[in-house]
Structures are given as C-alpha cells and as structure tokens.
C-alpha cells in the first residue's frame, strides 16, 4: 500500500481546523512526525506539560480582571486560545460554548461554565450534559431554577431536546413530561455577594410517573438525560454536528455510520469521534482552496499565536464584537451563525481594523519595526519577507501574483534613482513591508482555513 501523503500543508489545515493554526516550527515538526502522531498529540496532549505557555495577558499594560472589568472576560478566553498547549481542547471549548449557548448571566458564572466545558471537552457527552444541566448560568438562563412541580417550566426541557441532544423527533407531550422530570431545582442567592449556586429540593420535585420518548418511569433529572441520550436520534445528531464543525464537505452515509459506532461503542465519548473526523480524507481536500471561514476568535487567536505574542490590547474585546462574535454573549440559545454568515460589509470592516491593530507601530503584535524592509530585495524576496514575518500563512497563487505586482511597482517607481529617493529607500522599504503584510492579514485568503 502506498504511503499516505503528509506535508506541512496538511499540518496547517489540521491545526487550523483543530486549533488556531500552526507556526512554521509546528508545521515542520508534525509534518516530519506524521499524520497519526500529529492527531495523537492534538487529542492527548503532552503528559505533564503546562496548560498555558508564554507571557501573561494584559490590557494596555493593566493586569486582566475578568470578573470586574468589561471586556476582560473576552481577553481572558482569547488568552487561553493563544497560549494553550491543548489547542484541540480549546477549540472544542469554543464548540461547546456555542452548542450549549448561554448569555446574560453574571461574569463569574459564565467563567465557571467555560471551565466546565473545557474540562469535559473530549470526555463523555452524557457527563458533560449532566454538568451543564446543573450549571447555575445555564439554569438561570433557561429558567430551570425555581422549577416547581406545581408549575413546571418547559424552557430547558425544550431546548435540551431540540438544540443539545436530538434536533427533533420529540412531541409537545415529551416536552411537558420532561419539564416535570426537571422540577425541584432552586437557586441559592448569597446574602453577602458571591456566586449564585443551585440545589435540589425534593419537596418541589414531581415524583410521579412520566412517559418520555416512549419510555415510562418516575424520572428525575438524571433519568431524563439517560432516556434522551439513548434515543436513536441522539448519536446522529451530535456526531454530524461535530463533523460540520471541522469539515465543510457533506457527511456521507458510510462515514456517518462509522462516527456513530465510535460514539456508541465508547459510551458516548467525544474523543473517539473527533479522532475519526481529524483522520478523515475529507478534512484535507483542496488544500489550495480552503473554504471554511474563520470565526473571529479563531482569526485573532491564530494571528497572535503566529506572532508569538500574547494578549496585550484591550481593543480585542470590542473588535471581536464588531466582527460578530462577542465572547460569552451568543445572540440566542441557538448560538452563533457560522460559515459565510461571519462575513458582511460591517464585519469585514472590523477584520480590516483588526489588521490595523496587529500592525500598529507602537503596540501591534505584528508591528513593522524600523529596518524590517530591505531596499535591495527583489519583489519576490520582499513578499517572502512579509510572509515570513506573519508565520508563513497560506496565500493563493492569485494573491501571491498581486503581492508581487505591488512590490514590482514599488521598485519601478524608484527608477531612475534620484539622490532624495536613495535616502528614503530604507523607510520606503519598511512602508512596502507594512503594505504587503496588511494585505495578507486583511485579504480574502486570511479569512479562510
């Protein structure tokens, strides 16, 4: 059997889809190590390695205070994406935060929920569903607290089946009965500040027999969740959603069956499903024509990782919002719209502004320092210098031709050379680098992976 092709281009595709891009060093390292080794590292990590690596984050010189300062919660999460040594875990934390979309709750509760999603990112879905169901931010968001047997609230029961586990196949009767199973949860409001917690009050729980999805019993919270994840619609629902998060190609029937088998045979664990997806040939199709739009957080985190710089500017908080993805604030319980929906005239303007901040002369993570350009470079050398400074991102042949044309015109403007032009050559070479790098960062290629 011929050996499967595995190159740096494959590594870059894998690391973008399963993380936030690969540095040149990572691309070379994992291309040499091979496909299986690269996927193993993403899924398992390095035993004993630190969770985060690199300089601590800041906001315009100030220490982050995510609990008390607006926007610092977004910077806290962005920092984890930039410095993580488990990029797949962090990418799945983003996936689960969209899957279990929660909003408009106290920041400490949202941060706590984020940590819960991270801990369970690759583990048992049933366990994660149980933790999310008991999570104070979720319970407050979907009215599960103070859910009394005399007046069951159907909000969480409905969204749990529609958005979290099944996607359909249930009836209004199932929702009403599930709401009964979920009664008894109450919020505990602290008298002297502090975090809201939740507790179960047996006296407020409906202990009667319920009939849910064709099964009868005196179901409580855990019994209900067990019934739902055992339903035939659950495995196809969650595995197909995971597939779409990583791969843009349609999910064919044979692949869907394999993913469902991996999920069920592992007792509903996420890691085996993701491993199958990351190894699938469809993820690596058309390496020279990427077609998945980078979410705003993925875009910014990827640029900062490539720069080898951490979170330093408070502007990322509002810029992410203008790009359409304010962390911890999805637009609805259905989460964000992904794919081409990320791109509009307003959000593209914000992505252009993001490039300005990355290249800002004083504080930009990718700022062009004096002497970055070389007056004696050929157009090809100037373009390669710009790409090297940005971590060797993928650019299409058409984009490279346009960059070379720009650099060529810059050199043509200096012929024949005049004394005043000669003196300005170093500064003008830096200006060319700034222009080339901005075009790469803000152009269409940078928006795709």
Image: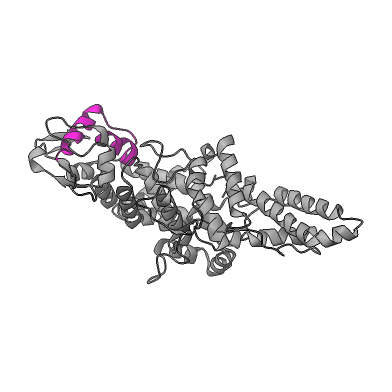
Q: Is residue 388 left or right of residue 419?
A: left
Residue at figure coordinates x 76%, y 59% from the top left: 427
Looking at the image, the residue that sits furthest to the bottom is: 48
Question: Can you give x and y, in whole percent of width and height, for residue 177 in the image?
Answer: 18, 32
Question: Can you give x and y, in whole percent of width and height, for residue 295 in the image?
Answer: 50, 46
Asked which colour scheme the image uses, the reply is one colour
- Does the magenta portion include 217? no
Q: Nearer the viewer, residue 283 or 221?
A: 221
Question: Can you give x and y, in whole percent of width and height, for residue 93 in the image?
Answer: 39, 52
Looking at the image, the residue that sits furthest to the top is: 172
Residue at figure coordinates x 83%, y 62% from the top left: 423
| Residue 259 visible, this orientation | yes
Q: Is residue 381 above or below residue 212?
A: below
| Residue 236 visible, this orientation | no
User: Of helix, strand and loop, which mostly describes the magenta segment?
Assistant: helix
Q: Is residue 251 left or right of residue 177?
A: right
For the magenta stretch, what is the residue range? 157-184
Question: Can you give x and y, in whole percent of width and height, for residue 228 in the image?
Answer: 25, 41
Q: Is residue 172 above or below residue 249?
A: above
């Amino acid at each position: 059997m011929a050996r499967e092709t595995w190159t740096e281009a494959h590594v870059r595709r894998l690391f973008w889809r399963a993380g936030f891009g690969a540095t040149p060093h990572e691309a070379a390292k994992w291309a040499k190590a091979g496909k299986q080794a690269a996927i193993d590292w993403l899924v398992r990590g390095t035993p004993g390695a630190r969770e985060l690596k690199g300089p601590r984050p800041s906001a315009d010189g100030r220490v982050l205070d995510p609990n008390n300062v607006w926007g610092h919660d977004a910077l806290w999460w962005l920092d984890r994406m930039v410095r993580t040594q488990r990029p797949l875990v962090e990418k799945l934390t983003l996936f689960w935060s969209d899957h279990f979309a929660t909003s408009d709750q106290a920041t400490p509760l949202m941060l706590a929920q984020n940590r819960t999603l991270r801990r369970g990112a690759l583990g048992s879905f049933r366990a994660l569903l149980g933790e999310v169901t008991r999570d104070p931010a979720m319970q407050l968001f979907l009215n599960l607290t103070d859910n009394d047997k005399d007046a069951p609230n159907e909000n969480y029961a409905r969204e749990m089946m529609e958005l979290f586990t099944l996607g359909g196949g249930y009836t209004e009767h199932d929702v009403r009965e599930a709401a009964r199973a979920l009664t008894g949860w109450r919020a505990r409001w602290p008298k002297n500040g502090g975090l809201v917690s939740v507790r179960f009050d047996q006296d407020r729980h409906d202990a009667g027999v319920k009939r849910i999805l064709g099964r009868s019993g005196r179901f409580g919270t855990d019994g209900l969740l067990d019934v739902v994840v055992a339903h035939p619609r659950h495995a196809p629902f969650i595995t197909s959603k995971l597939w779409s998060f990583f791969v843009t190609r349609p999910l064919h029937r044979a692949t869907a069956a394999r993913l469902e088998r991996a999920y069920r045979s592992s007792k509903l664990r996420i890691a085996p499903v993701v491993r199958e997806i990351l190894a699938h040939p469809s993820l690596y199709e058309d390496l020279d024509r990427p077609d998945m739009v980078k979410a705003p957080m993925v875009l910014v985190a990827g640029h900062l990782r490539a720069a080898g710089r951490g979170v330093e500017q408070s502007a990322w908080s509002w810029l992410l919002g203008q790009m359409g993805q304010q962390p911890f604030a999805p637009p609805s319980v259905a989460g964000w719209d992904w794919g081409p929906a990320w791109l509009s005239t307003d959000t593209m303007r914000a992505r252009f502004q993001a490039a300005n901040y990355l290249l800002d002369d004083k504080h930009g993570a990718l700022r062009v320092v004096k002497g970055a350009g070389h007056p004696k470079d050929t157009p090809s050398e100037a373009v390669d210098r710009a790409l090297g400074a940005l971590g060797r991102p993928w650019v299409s042949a058409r984009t490279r031709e346009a960059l070379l044309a720009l650099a060529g015109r810059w050199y043509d403007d200096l012929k024949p050379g005049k004394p005043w032009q000669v003196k300005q050559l170093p500064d003008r070479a830096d200006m060319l680098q700034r222009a080339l790098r901005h075009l790469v960062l803000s152009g269409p290629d940078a928006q795709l992976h």
